[in-house]
Image: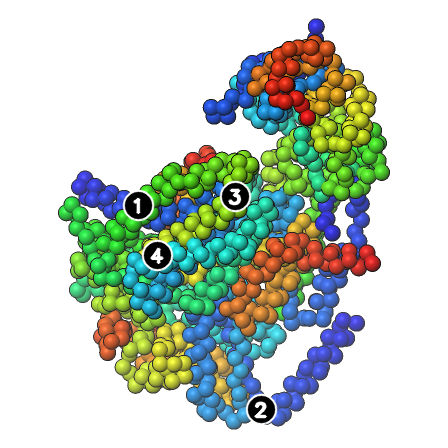
Amino acid sequence: MQAFASSLVSVLFHGIAYGMILYVISVGLSVTMGLMGFVNLAHGVFAMAGGLLLSTAMAKYAVPFPLALLLAFVVVALGSVVLERLLYSKLYSAGELAQVLFTMGLIFISIAIARQLYGTQAAPVFLPDYLKGQINILGRDFPAFRVVLIFISAIIVVTLWFGVERTRWGAMVRAAVDNRDMAQSVGINTNRLFMVTFALGSGLAGLGGALGSDILPVQSTYPLENLVYFMIVVAVGGLGSLSGPFIAALMIGIADTATKYWFPELGAFLIYAATIGLLLWRPQGLFGVRS
Amino acid sequence: MGHSFLRKSLAVAAAVGILTGAASAQTIKIGVVNTFSGPQASFGEMIDRAFRLYIKLNSDKLPPGVKIEIINRDDGGANPDKAKQLAQELIVRDKIDFLSGITFTPNGMAIAPIATQAKMPTVLVNAGTSVVVTRSPYYVRTSFTIFQHCVPLGTWAAKSLKKTFILVSDYAPGHDCEEAYSSSYKPAGGEIVGVIRAPVATADFAPFLQRVKDAKPDALMVFLPAGRTATAMMKSFVDLGLKSSGIKLIGTGDIAPEEELPNMGDEAIGTISMFHYSAAGDRPANKAFVAAWRKEYGEKATPNFAAASSWDGMAMMFDAIIKQNGKLNPDKSIEIMSHFKTDNSPRGTIYIDPETRDIVQNEYLRETRRVNGELQNVEIETAAVAIKDPWQAMQKAKK
Amino acid sequence: MTRTGSYSGHARIGIMEALPWIAAIAVFFLLPDYLSLGARIMIYILFTLSLDLILGYAGIITLGHSVFLGIGAYAAGILSVKLNINDPFLQLIAGSLMSAVFGLASGAVILRTKNLTLLMLTLAITAIVYEIGNKASWLTGGADGLPGVQVNPFFGRFEFDLWGRTGYIYCVIVLFVVWFVVRRLIYSPFGAMLTGIRENTPRMHALGAPVYQRLLIVYTISAGIAGIAGVLMTQVTQSVGLNVLTFEVAGDVLVMLILGGVGRIYGAFVGPVVYMIAQDLLAKQFPEYWSFGVGVLLIFVVFFARGGILGLVDKIAARGRTP
Amino acid sequence: MSAPALETRDLCKQFGALTVASNINFRLEAGARHALIGPNGAGKTTFVNMLTGALPATSGKILFGGEDISQMAQAARTKRGLGRTFQITSLFRDLPVLDNVALGIAEREGVSLKMWKPASSYKTIRDESMAHLETMGLAAEALLRVKDLPYGKQRLVEIAIALGLKPKVLLLDEPAAGVPSIESGRILDVLADLPKDIAILIIEHDMDIVFRFAQRITVLVQGAVLVEGAPEEIANDQRVRDVYLGEGGHD
C-alpha cells in the first residue's frame, strides 16, 4: 500500500511537470486558434526555436539559465511578429486547407534550418549546478530541476490568467474570442490584438520549449514529433479557452506518465484512444468556446 | 519505333562500353543505398566518409587501371519501397558491381530478392537484425547483430550484478536485445526483476526510470535506437537519482554513442556498454584509423561503429577486387568475401563466417570515462573473442 | 480546369486526357531504366487520386490518409507471408476491401465531426494503427518489416523482373482501370453532389442531402482505392515496412496533391510525377535542402498558386486566349 | 378543417441565458401567403432555422402537415417538402447557375447516389432546372458561374433552387434584401406567380413587398409573437407602430 502511495506521488509529480510544460507551450495555440480561427500546425516551431535559443545562449555565450529563458521568450515573440505580419495575417480568412498547408510548409522549412544549424542530435542543455540533483520535500527526493520547472510554470500560468481576467488586453481577447465581428464593431483593433496575442502565445511556446528541453529534448524534428501532443491539448481542452487546455494538459501529462509507469506496454495507445473518445463525446473539446 | 530506338541506343551504349574497356581504365562501381536525409541522416555521413577515406588511402593497392566509383542513393530512413527502387535502379541503370550501405533492416529485407535475382554481391554495413543476412545468398554483413552485443552483456552482468531491470525500445531490435540478454543472464543465475518496453518515440524517460528506481535493481540494462534518445535517458537516469542510488547503467554501445557523449557531460561517466567498436580502443589499427579520420575530417570528428563497419566493408570489397584482379564475377566475389579475414580492422581481428556470411568479431566491455578532458568509452575487457551471431546458433539448436 | 460532375457540362474524354497514358507507354519504351521509379510513381498517383476524391471533391482535410495505404499494404503482405495466398488479383481485392471496411468503420465514427476535431481524429487514428503495426510484430514483423511477400506470375506467365517491366505494366493497368472508374464517379451525379458539399455544406443540408452518409460513402471508396495503392506497393516491393503508416507519407501525398492541383483528377497525376522526379534528382544531391525546398514550395503554392501546377497552366492558357 | 401546412407549439430557443424564441405558437395554413416581420434581432431567422432544422429548438414542437418533425434532421425535413431560401445568399458560387438548381432537383429525385452515368446525361433534371431558370428569367445566364452574376440575380437563383425542391412549404428569408428596386419588382412578380398550392412564409423588411404579397402577417418582437392578423389590422395596430417607430422606422 505504501509502495503504491509512493509510486502515485511519483506519477503525479512527473505527470504535472509534463502537463505544465505542455500547457505553457500549447496555451498560445489554443488562444490563437480560438481568436483567429487559424489552424497553426507550426506552433511547435516556436517551441523548438525557444529550446535552440536557450541551448545556444547557454553553451556558446555562457548566458545564465534564467536570462536564457527570458531571452527565449522575447526573441521568439519578436520573431513571431515578423511571421505574423508577413505571412500568417494574409491567411486569416483563407480557409483551413490553405492554413494547414502553409503551416506544414513552415514546419518543413524550420526542420531543414534547425538541422543545418544544429545537426540531428538533440541540442545540449547543461543546467547550472543549483538545478541539478535532488531536493528533499517531506522526506522524499524529487529532481530539483523538475520542481523548479513546475514552480516557474505555475507562476506563468497565474500571471497569464490574471492578465486575461484583469487587463484591458484580456478583456479584448475574451470579447474577440466570443464574437469577432462584434468586437470589431465596438472599435477593437483586431489586427493589433491578433498580433500581440500571437506574439505572446508564440513567446510562451518558446519559453515552454526552452524550459521543457529536459522533458521534450529539442532536436530538428521537434515540431513534427510533438505536433500531435500540442494539438491534442488544444483540441481536447477546447479552442479559445484558457482553463480547458490547462486541465487537458494536466490530464494528458498525468495519464501519459501513469501509463508509462504502470502499463508501459500500452505505449501511446491509451492517450490516442482517450483523445478519440473525448473528441467524439465532445467535439468542441472540454471547455471549447467554439469547435 | 520505340523498339528500334531502344535497340540503337543499347548498341551505342555497348560500343562505348567496349571502347572504354579497351582503354584498360576500368571503373568498378559501388552502389550505396544509404540514409542522408530524415532524422537518421547521421548514418549516411558516417558511412560515406568511411568509404571515401578507405578508398583514398588504399587505392594504390588496386590492380593497375582499376578505379572505384561510389554512387550514393538516399533512402531517407526505413523506407523499403524506396530502398528497393533505388537498388533496382543502381543494378539496372547504373550497372554497379557491388551494392552496399543498407542502413536499416526493412530496407535490407526488401532489397534481398533483387540482390538474389541480379546476383549482386551486397555488403551490409549497418543493419543489425540477425535474420536479414539470411534473406539472400548474395548478402555479406560486416556490421554486427543485436545478439552479438546483448548475449555477452548478459554473461558479463551475471557475474556481479544479480538483479537486472530491462528497459528496451518497443520494436523488433529492442525485443531482440531483451531476448538475447535474458538468454545468457538467467542461466548464469541472474534475476530479471522487471521489463519495460518503452515506445520508440519516447522523449521523457522519467516515468519509466522512476519505476526502475522503485524496483531497486543492481543494474539497468537499456537498449535504445542508435543516435538520438540516449542523452535524454541518461539525463533522467541521473536526475532521478538512479545513479547516486548505486544502480549500474549497462547496455549496448547505443546508450553512450561517441557523438552524444559531449552533450551528456559527466552524467555519462561510469556507464557500462557492450559493443564491437570504440573509437577509444587502443589497438594500433584503430589508432591509425582514428588519426586518419581526424586528419581528413577535422580534429573534432570521431568515427563511430557504422564508420568502422563501413571501413571494413570497403576493405572486404577491395579484397574481392584485388583477388580477382579487377575481373569481377559475382559468385566469385561472394565466395571471396565469405572467407574474408583481417587482423587489421579498427575492431581487432574480424572475419566472415563462410556458412552464414555474417561477421565474426570481438565484443568489448567499455566504461565511459573522462580521459584527458574528453569523454571516452574506454575498453576495459574483451568480453567475447571471435563471437559468431548467437541467434544463428540458437536457430540451429531449435531445429 | 477543375473537373467536376456537372449537369450543364459534358463528360467526354478530351484529347488531353490521353496524354498521361501516351506518356506512360512512351516511358516504357524510351526509358526502360526508369521503370521501377515509374512503378512507384504510378502507385503514388493512385494514392494521390484517392486523396483527391475526399479532399479535392468532398473537402475533407485529413492528415492521416496513410492509414489506408498501410492497411492495404499489410493486408497483401500478411495474406502472402502468413496465409500463403499469392494470387495477385486476390491480394488486390482483399487489400482494397480491408482498407475500405476500415474506411467505413473509422469514417462512421469521425465524419460526424468537422474542422480541427476531424483533423485531429485522422491523425490520432493513424497513430494508433501505426502503434498496432509496430506492436503486433508476430503478424506484421514490426519495425523490421514483413519481407518475403510472394506474388504468383500474372496469368501464370509474367513474373516481376529485375527491370521492373512487369511491375510497371501492372501498375499502369491498375491505375488505368481505377482512373476510369474515378472519372466516371466524378462526372456522375454523385460527383456533382460531392462538389456541392465541398462548396457549401450547409446548403447541401438544406437541399435535403444527408451529408454525413454521402461523406461516409466517398470516404469508404477513397479508402478502398488507397488500399489498392498499398497492395501494389507491397507486391512491387515484395515486402512491407512500417513507413507506409507514418505521418510523413500522409504529408507527402498531401503535398503531391496540392502541388498538382486539387479537385482536378489530373492534379493527382502531375503532382506525384513532379514531386518524385524532383526528389529523385535533387534529394540525392542536396538531401539537406530537400525539406527546405518542399516547405518553400508549399508556401509558394498557398500564396501564389492555389490551383497547383494545373491551376498555373490554366491561368497561362487563359492569358493566351484573351489577346 | 385540415391540418395547417406548418405549425409550431410553444417553440423555445435559448442560447445560454439568452432567450431568442419564447413560446412561439404559429400556424401557416395550406396555400397561405404569410409574412413574418419584426425589428432587427427579433429572432426571425432563428425561427426559420428552427423550422428547417438548421438549429435545434430548446423545447416545443414543430408539426409539418400534422406530423411532428421536431426531432427530424434538416435533410429529412427538406425531403418532406420544407424548402427555404437564405437571407444572405448561400449559393454554390463557383458552380454554374444551372447546377445550383440541378443539385437540389437531383436530391429530390434521388439520383445523387448514381455513380456511373455522367450527370449531364440526366436530361429530365437538366430540363426541369432550365424550366425554373426560365421562370426566373435566368435562362440566358444558365451556364455562367453564380459569382459572375449581379447580386439581384443571385437572389433569383436562390428562389429557383427552392422551387426546384417542389416544396409544399416555402420559407423565404428576405428574398429582396440588398436588391435594387428595379429588380425587386421582378422578384415580387415571380413570387406572385408561384403555384397556389405552396404555402409561403416570407420574412421581409421591405414593407411594400410585405403588404403587396401577404394575406396574413405575424409580428415577432424579442422572440415572441406580438400580434398576428390581416395586413390592414397590422398596419393599424398601435403596438406594431410603437415597435417600429421606436426603432426609428424601417429601412
Does residue A121 appear left or right of residue D241 in this picture? left
| Count of labels in the image | 4
Q: Which residue bears the numbered disc 4?
A: A70
Disc 3 with disc 1 on a shared chain: yes
Q: Nearer the viewer, residue B75 or B360?
A: B75
User: Which label sits on residue A190?
Assistant: 3
Q: CA distance from mark 4 to mark 1?
A: 16 Å
Secondary structure state at the residue bearing disc 1: helix
Tell which circle, 4 or 1, labels the residue nearer the N-terminal end.
4
Q: Earlier in the sequence, mark 3 or mark 1?
A: 1
Which of the two marks, 4 or 1, is nearer to us in this view?
4
Q: Which residue is mark 2?
A: B25
Q: Nearer the viewer, mark 4 or mark 3?
A: 3
Q: Chain of mark 1?
A: A
**Front label number (3 vs 1):** 3
- Residue shown at the point (62%, 44%) measured from the top left: C59
Alpha-carbon neighbours of circle 3 within 10 Å: few (<14), some, or many (≥20)? Answer: some
Q: CA distance from mark 2 to mark 1?
A: 72 Å
| Amino acid type, label 3 | Thr
Q: Secondary structure at mark 3?
A: helix
Q: Are marks 3 and 1 in contact (CB under 8 Å)?
A: no
Q: Chain of mark 2?
A: B
For badge 2, the amino acid type reads Ala
Q: Is residue C282 above or below residue C97?
A: below
Q: Answer left or right for C115 relative to A262.
A: right
Residue A169 showing in the rendered view: yes
